[in-house]
Amino acid sequence: MERAKESTNPIEEMGVLWITAGLGCDGDTIAMTAATQPSIEDVVCGGIPWIPKITFHNPFLALENGDDFLKPFHRAAKGELAPFILVIEGSVPDESNKPEGYWASLGTDNGTGQPILTCDWIDRLAPRAWAVVAAGTCATYGGIHAMQGNPTGAMGLADYLGWEWKSQAGIPIVCVPGCPVQPDNMMETLLYLFYMAAGRAPMISLDQQLRPTWLFGQTVHEGCDRGGYYEQADFAEEYGSPLCIVKLGCWGPVVQCNVGKRGWMGGIGGCPNVGGICIGCTMPGFPDKFMPFMNQPPGSLLSASAVQTYGKAIHALRTFTQASLNKEPKWRCREHPKGDTVNAHAPGATDPRQ
Ligand code: SF4
Ligand code: SF4
């Protein structure tokens, strides 16, 4: 069983340095505040047993501002704050694709008075990080900003650092995609890394796209509330219907995401469960390969048509069986005072249950 290099010396205290200064909307940080499995409060207040003492440094959650907020980042860059997990939110721009100016930065260099580029922070901190996590689809694979033709040259963290990159603890980049990230997926992944740091968990299991396998191993379709309608070829023609929405543009059958099962907040919601088509936001090909949204996915034209052949027949048979099952067996009748049974099925008899 593979383990992180430091796992023989359990880590007792750990920082989380969370940079939201990639190209993004900060939605992953906002989503994370809704997590309950575990919540941020559980983690930072010591409510989770057997993990290191955790200190979060995230600009939306911090009490400090400006240079005070940046102090731990500077200390970590100098090797004075360790160990830490570096979390990157937002895609990484290509700062070399223009003669002047910059795309993304965090803070100002007090010596030069110039902005410190987000890329520079990654270059300084990633080599010293115990683990590096990409939060949300922008940081993992580029997302909206990396659409074809964008001027920023935006890319995901693995494209920037390299897909084979590993931290000083031997941990590959951990990608938790989603636009935004599903709150509990993010916090559960961090929790797993905390257990690893404490020497209580083996090396995190990641797929080829560096996603945690236990979170992204199944399709939306396999956990969707509407899966039964798909199987019976009950397809919605307009929004507001409880039926399967594949004809309205749902990509769930081929998208790896667990919100169909997990829900969104506290087990409630999850895109198709509540009527929103899946647009594939956890996938490396998002968004270009899923556009135009709201059109029926080309592949489902074939599969949904094939389902029509047997789905309608199966549904008709089930309706027939269901009608029978909705009636009690014939022998459940009240005994007649003379010992005879009230035969509700005798010619001319009236059975009030029918
Ligand atoms: S709504 Fe989407 S994910 Fe759900 S059953 Fe239909 S195609 Fe599958
Ligand atoms: S169901 Fe689809 S659109 Fe919704 S979070 Fe998952 S991948 Fe994204």
Image (cartoon, helix red, strand yellow):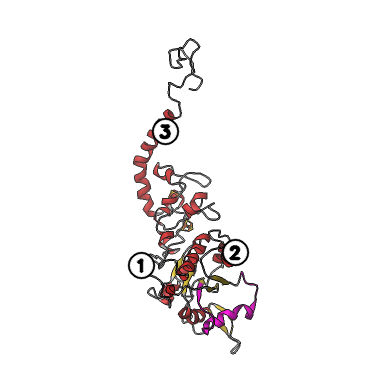
Magenta-drawn stretch contains 228: no
Residue labelled with disc 1: 1
What number is the disc on residue 41? 2
Q: For the residue marked with disc 2, what is the amino acid?
A: Glu
Q: For the residue marked with disc 3, what is the amino acid?
A: Thr
Of mark 2 and mark 3, the one earlier in the sequence is 2
Look at the picture and state if 274 lies above or below 108.
above
Residue labelled with disc 3: 319
Place of residue 65 in the rendered image (x, y in percent of width and height, measured from the top left): 65, 76
- Label 3 near label 2: C-beta < 8 Å? no
Of mark 3 and mark 1, the one earlier in the sequence is 1
Horizontally, residue 25 falls left or right of residue 96, namely: right
Say which of marks 3 and 1 sits in front. 1
Q: Secondary structure at mark 1?
A: loop
- Label 2 near label 1: C-beta < 8 Å? no
Q: CA distance from mark 3 to mark 1?
A: 51 Å
Look at the picture and state if 159 lies above or below 252.
below
Q: CA distance from mark 2 to mark 3?
A: 49 Å
Q: Secondary structure at mark 2?
A: helix
* Residue 141 in view of the camera: no
Q: Quadrant of the N terminus?
A: bottom left
Place of residue 216 in the rendered image (x, y in percent of width and height, measured from the top left): 42, 60
Q: Residue drawn at (39%, 37%), measured in percent from left and top?
A: 315
Place of residue 334 in the rendered image (x, y in percent of width and height, measured from the top left): 49, 18
Look at the picture and state if 89 lies above or below 306.
below
Q: Is mark 2 within 8 Å of ligand 2?
A: no
Q: Residue drawn at (63%, 81%), measured in percent from left and top?
A: 67
Q: Which residues are magenta?
A: 60-87
Magenta-drawn stretch contains 64: yes
